[in-house]
């Protein structure tokens, strides 16, 4: 079946460290891929997305590249800030109108100064 | 513009009682989704609406769960005879039907005692 697997956390980093959160997927066809972020006490927000192979999504210094050959969509940031502390969810959506998102279990990131 | 809104933000109820959760999607969004976020299960899809019809109810966990949408706008998720395992955050999202990005509300935190 269709699924998303992301690295388990928590991930604890110091400010300005490099971040990678791994995400791999299993899906029929060619899904669209997303990273959502949930800051403490807030709702889910779209962070970035990619709709086809080799696309790179980017936002707020975060990047992820849609790798069809490895079925991956790893999230990276070159220099994290304390304000990046949040839970990050990788998700896929099959390319049919109205299809729901399938989420990974989420990775908690904690950044200290 | 206004985002997705949900009410109540928190709900505490006794086991066996019925609860209703409300979602107001972004104006003009014809697609509406309900998800559930719980500690053990992560983020799970419950039901999808296109207009007032629900082509995909596959995620509803039991017949105690039902949802409706009227006027192509507001949706209500009803849980009858609540159980403790229903305790979770219930999230609503909306999108333009042929766009992929789903925008999430802040959620309703349900606690069943």
Image (tube, coloured by chain):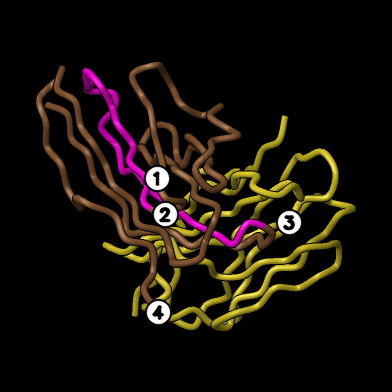
Chain colours: A yellow, B brown
The reply to whether residue B83 is in sight is no
Q: In the rendered structure, are the residues bearing label 3 and label 2 in contact, judged by CB atoms less than 8 Å apart?
A: no
Q: Nearer the viewer, residue B74 or B15?
A: B74
Q: Is label 1 in a helix, a strand or a loop?
A: loop
Look at the image and tell me in which quarter the N terminus of chain A lies: top right
Q: Residues within 10 Å of mark 3 (few under 14, many from 20)?
A: some
User: Marks 4 and 2, how far apart in space?
Assistant: 16 Å
Q: In the rendered structure, are the residues bearing label 2 and label 1 in contact, judged by CB atoms less than 8 Å apart?
A: yes
Q: Which residue is mark 2?
A: B73
Q: Which residue is mark 4?
A: B1
User: Residue B59's x, y, as percent?
Assistant: 51, 29
**Looking at the image, is mark 3 or mark 2 nearer the viewer?**
2
Identify the residue at image location x=65%, y=60%.
B100
Looking at the image, is mark 1 or mark 4 earlier in the sequence? 4
Same chain for labels 3 and 2? Say yes or no.
no
Q: Which residue is mark 1?
A: B70
């Amino acid at each position: 079946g269709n699924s998303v697997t992301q690295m388990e956390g928590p991930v604890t980093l110091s400010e300005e460290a490099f971040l990678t959160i791994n995400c791999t997927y299993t899906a029929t066809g060619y899904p669209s891929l997303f990273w959502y972020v949930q800051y403490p006490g807030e709702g889910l927000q779209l962070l970035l997305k990619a709709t086809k192979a080799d696309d790179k999504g980017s936002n707020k210094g975060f990047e992820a590249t849609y790798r069809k050959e490895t079925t991956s969509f790893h999230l990276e940031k070159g220099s994290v800030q304390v304000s990046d502390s949040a839970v990050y969810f990788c998700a896929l959506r099959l390319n049919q109108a109205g299809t729901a998102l399938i989420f990974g279990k989420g990775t908690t990131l904690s950044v200290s100064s | 513009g206004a985002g997705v809104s949900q009410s109540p933000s928190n709900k505490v109820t006794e086991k066996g009682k019925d609860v209703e959760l409300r979602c107001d999607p972004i104006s003009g969004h014809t697609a509406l989704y309900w998800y559930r976020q719980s500690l053990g299960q992560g983020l799970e899809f419950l039901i999808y609406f296109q207009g007032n019809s629900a082509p995909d109810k596959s995620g509803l966990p039991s017949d105690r769960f039902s949802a409706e949408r009227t006027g192509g706008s507001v949706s209500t998720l009803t849980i009858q005879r609540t159980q403790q395992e229903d305790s979770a955050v219930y999230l609503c999202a909306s999108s333009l039907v042929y766009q992929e990005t789903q925008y999430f509300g802040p959620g309703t935190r349900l606690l069943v005692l």
